[in-house]
Image (cartoon, helix red, strand yellow):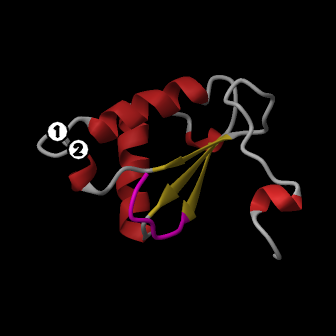
Amino acid sequence: MIGNPSENGYRMPAEWEPHAATWLAWPHNREDWPGKFGPIPWVYCEIVRLLVQSEPVNIVVQDRDAQRDVRRRLERSGVPLDAVTFHRWKTDRV
């Protein structure tokens, strides 16, 4: 790609614009929530539980172990996993 994304016709759509799915990076860096990380994965479970009622959700996880943990949490939260697609990509933030 030559130039920056906007010069190539890409833009970040507003959250209310029509879209095919929601993408989330699963939280894993405890430094993002110092001393408060414990409930954060469960908050994300609730976000996903509500989103899948109206659209597919793509979740970025660090690796296979993280995917296994997230699947388990989502199942315990009543999330239908057929509406969730996992992608294994290392990130440093959500």
Predominant secondary structure, magenta span = loop
Q: Secondary structure at mark 1?
A: loop
Percent coordinates x, y for residue 49 in the rendering:
50, 28
Q: Is residue 93 above or below residue 45?
A: below
Report which residue position mark 1 lands on: 36
Percent coordinates x, y for residue 85 in the rendering:
62, 52
Closer to the camera in the image, 80 or 57: 57
The residue positioned 78% from the left and 38% from the top of the image is: 20
Q: Are marks 2 and 1 in contact (CB under 8 Å)?
A: yes
- Whether residue 79 can be seen here: yes
Q: Is residue 54 left or right of residue 2?
A: left
Percent coordinates x, y for residue 73 in the rendering:
35, 42
Residue 28 occupies quadrant: bottom left
Amino acid type, residue under disc 2 in the picture? Trp
The residue positioned 43% from the left and 69% from the top of the image is: 64
Residue 33 numbered tag: 2
Q: In the image as oriented, which residue stretches furthest toward the bottom? A: 2
